[in-house]
Amino acid sequence: MSGGPAQHLSELQDGFQDYLLIPNPGHPFQSQVVGNGQASAESRLQIYAEAYRLRLEEALETDFEALHALLGDEQFHELCLRYIDAHPSSHYSLRYFGRSMSDFLRAVSPYAAQGVLADLAGFEWSLIDAFDAPDGPAVTVEDMGRLPTETWPHLRFELHASVQRLELTWNAPQIWAALKDQQTPPAPEKLESPQRWLVWRQDYRSYYRPLSDSEASALDCARAGKTFAELCEDLCRQMEEEKIAAAAAGFLQRWVSDGLVREVFSHHPNP
């Protein structure tokens, strides 16, 4: 069966997309475009390629406002061009185009020498991910109060899709907050040890806060599907035994109040 007009159109679309993603002189798709007295085929295609790259840069500007403000227009523009070349868009939605920015900044010179840039990009992206995460119900304090006491050691928790854990080695959240409020940001400062952060969404708004080592460990246990009893056992390595029950209950109460817990499962064994 020979290809018809639909197949030919599909081939043209694929060729045009390939050119837009990686434009270069002598690209085979140029043979599909006719020049005129005002512009050559290459020039006509380049107009589309430049417009496409400008749209990609606009998407990065929207997603990384604080990074843009910290670098300034000229350096951010240069960063965008290099990122676009290194990471051609691979998804039909621009929503995901900037997902590799933090890794790019961490790996590529001269940005890798400024560790705060990768941390700031990673923090901004986590806020976007939290905001765009799927909706879902949240367990309430009243729901927890109705659970029989004997089931508590066997409880497992499913967290909301927006919940994220970050470890940052620079004061990126403080810089982000100042730039968001159009204030002079603090100077970049590398921390003595990585700071753990929690990012999540509640009531259509993204939130973030620092985590203690013990709460971060407890949250990791919950995300891994461990029971409440196993979570408490993990805390034994970090605090005195007499403090564990109160600490674990306090963590869980705050998670529920903040809308972090989507569902609670109880697999209490039969006597």
Image: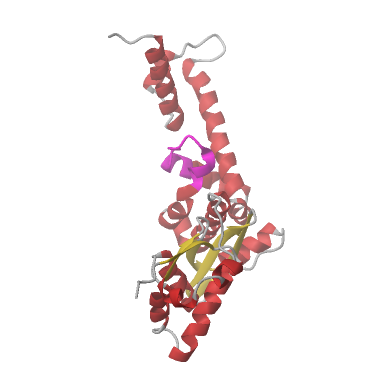
| Residue 180 x, y percent position in the rendering | 68, 58
Residue nearer the viewer, 192 or 203 = 203
Residue 255 is left or right of residue 241, and the answer is right
Which residue is located at x 54 percent, y 15 percent? 39
Q: Is residue 86 magenta?
A: yes
In the image, is residue 91 above or below residue 184? above
Residue 110, visible in the rendered structure: no
Which residue is located at x 35 percent, y 72 percent? 270
- In the picture, residue 71 is in which quadrant? bottom right
Q: Which residues are magenta?
A: 83-98
Residue 270 is left or right of residue 109, and the answer is left
Residue 68, visible in the rendered structure: yes
| Residue 217 x, y percent position in the rendering | 44, 74
Q: How is the image coloured?
A: secondary structure
Instruction: Name the image quarter holding the C terminus.
Output: bottom left
Q: Is residue 234 magenta?
A: no
| Residue 90 x, y percent position in the rendering | 43, 37
| Residue 87 x, y percent position in the rendering | 43, 42
Instruction: Name the image quarter holding the N terminus.
Output: top left
Which residue is located at x 49 percent, y 88 percent? 243
Residue 207 is left or right of residue 235, and the answer is right
- In the picture, residue 205 is in which quadrant? bottom right
Which residue is located at x 45 percent, y 77 percent? 150
In the image, is residue 238 above or below residue 7? below
Residue farthest left in this picture? 1
Residue nearer the viewer, 239 or 99 = 239
Residue farthest front in this picture? 271
